[in-house]
Image (cartoon, helix red, strand yellow):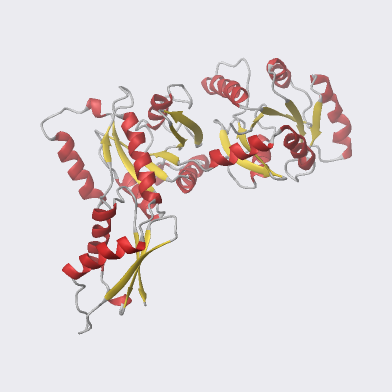
């Protein structure tokens, strides 16, 4: 397994800023009020050739009745279980608080190495005051300012010393696994689907719409299948985006799509496919992602003959022209066909990687072109001489012909359908390019 570092600490000590600095990107939602980061966030960092995963946990708040704070506490325990080393973040500007002490108590019981990072040490005076943190009883103390980045180098050196070459390599291997993003509108059952698959309460599931605010990566290894599942914050309709946080979650969902190879688009069986779902679908196709459509809560539908077949036909009409997409009727609650969903996603992933031999491609496609020629434009017969697949990460094909600009949309669709029929690109968008020989 790879090497994982968890960043823990009470709210507002600057965990997310520090996390972003390690990853050099704006990944966690950073906002100035307490408790914004609700879930664990993952990223892969690299320091002096050592690679490791970082988890940023939600702010830790002990002994509180607030549902989220209780959940966050659970998250920290999970993070500590998953991690090989723990970065315990405290704040020099406030000194040791009761929360810090109660957290230190939990961490002292863990056998994992704990590195205490005293943040917001911006001047010499603060450095003098910060030495009180030695009294927490951990031997590794680092003084940093995550805003300016001073002191992070020493901390990273300390972390790198804990990581073996093998763990570093494993971390990279994991990063290369297929990534599936579970997308869809709030409350269609994305988190329930994730939990049903993994069989443990991984994300915070509660009935408040928009509870899952961040994406959560879960490494999944079952039935000899290995992949990463990304659970995204619900994408919402624009009108509801009144707080910036919601706006961030929409951006986040779009970013999760960028990270993913395949999008599992979850629909609510009773509501059907809404405009917002079509947007997600269109965006996935535009970004060249594989797509599997999962119609959830199928257990609640009244079944007449042909229900599923008619439903699927109607659905494919709505998502046309890209309708060569697997549709599966599932119930996360009853766990109906949810493993089939994973198998389909892996098949689509394989289709997305497919490289067709040039000789075979030309055999098949030139015959198809022979049996139905491109229409003549301005008295010019369009002749397509040769086809090749381009080395891109979305299946793309170049057709070499005498008048590349004269190949019109209907004929392009014909060629795409022929490619789909002969080489199985189900669930994957295809790009066609026409070039002068």
Q: Residue furthest front?
A: 359
The x and y percentages for residue 111 are: 70, 18
Question: Seen in the image, is 67 located left or right of residue 346?
Answer: right
The x and y percentages for residue 2 are: 60, 34
Q: Quadrant of residue 190?
A: top left
Q: Residue furthest left?
A: 305
Question: Seen in the image, is 289 located left or right of residue 84?
Answer: left
Q: Residue furthest bottom?
A: 379
Q: Quadrant of residue 155?
A: top right
Visible residue check, residue 399: yes
The x and y percentages for residue 374 are: 21, 73
Please tell me whether residue 295 is drawn above or below residue 402 in the rendered image. above
Question: Closest to the observer: 399 or 310?
Answer: 399
Q: Quadrant of the N terminus?
A: top right
Q: Quadrant of the C terminus?
A: bottom left
Residue shown at the point (41%, 41%) measured from the top left: 235
Please tell me whether residue 433 is drawn above or below residue 213 in the rendered image. below
Visible residue check, residue 284: no
Question: Seen in the image, is 77 located left or right of residue 227?
Answer: right
Question: Closest to the observer: 215 or 154?
Answer: 154
Please tell me whether residue 61 is drawn above or below residue 320 in the rendered image. above
User: Count the marks: how many?
Assistant: 0
The x and y percentages for residue 212 are: 47, 32
């Amino acid at each position: 397994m790879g090497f994982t570092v968890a960043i823990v600490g009470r709210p507002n000590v600057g965990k997310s800023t520090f996390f972003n600095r390690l990853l050099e990107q704006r990944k966690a939602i950073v906002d100035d009020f307490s408790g914004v980061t609700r879930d664990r966030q993952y990223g892969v960092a690299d320091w002096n050739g050592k690679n490791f995963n970082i988890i940023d946990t939600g702010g830790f708040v002990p002994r509180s009745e607030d549902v989220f704070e209780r959940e966050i506490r659970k998250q920290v325990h999970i993070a500590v279980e998953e991690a090989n080393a723990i970065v315990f973040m405290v704040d020099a500007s406030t000194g040791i608080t009761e929360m810090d002490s109660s957290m230190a108590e939990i961490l002292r019981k863990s056998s994992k190495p704990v590195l205490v990072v005293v943040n917001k040490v911006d001047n010499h005076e603060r450095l003098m005051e910060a030495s009180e943190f030695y009294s927490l009883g951990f031997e590794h103390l680092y003084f940093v300012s995550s805003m300016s980045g001073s002191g992070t180098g020493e901390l990273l050196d300390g972390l790198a010393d804990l990581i073996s070459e093998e763990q570093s390599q494993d971390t990279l291997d994991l990063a290369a696994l297929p990534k599936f993003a579970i997308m869809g509108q709030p409350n269609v059952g994305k988190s329930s689907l994730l939990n049903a698959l993994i069989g443990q309460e991984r994300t915070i599931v509660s009935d408040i719409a928009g509870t899952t605010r961040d994406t959560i990566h879960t490494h999944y290894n079952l039935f000899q299948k290995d992949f990463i599942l990304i659970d995204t914050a619900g994408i919402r309709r624009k009108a509801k985006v009144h707080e910036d946080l919601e706006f961030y979650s929409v951006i986040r969902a779009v970013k999760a799509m960028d990270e993913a190879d395949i999008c599992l688009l979850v629909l609510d069986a009773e509501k059907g496919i809404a405009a917002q779902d079509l947007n997600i679908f269109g965006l996935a196709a535009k970004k060249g992602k594989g797509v599997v459509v999962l119609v959830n809560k199928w257990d609640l539908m009244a079944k007449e003959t042909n229900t599923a077949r008619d439903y699927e036909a109607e659905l494919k009409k709505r998502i046309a022209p890209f309708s060569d997409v697997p549709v599966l009727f599932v119930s996360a609650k009853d766990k109906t066909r949810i493993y089939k969903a994973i198998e389909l996603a892996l098949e689509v992933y394989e289709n997305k990687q497919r490289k067709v031999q040039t000789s075979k491609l030309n055999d098949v496609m030139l015959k198809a072109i022979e049996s139905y020629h491109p229409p003549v434009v301005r008295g010019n017969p369009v002749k397509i001489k040769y086809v090749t697949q381009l080395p891109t990460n979305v299946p793309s094909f170049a057709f070499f012909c005498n008048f590349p600009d004269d190949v019109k949309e209907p004929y392009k669709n014909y060629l795409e359908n022929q490619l789909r029929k002969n080489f199985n690109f189900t669930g994957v968008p295809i790009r066609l390019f026409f070039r002068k020989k």
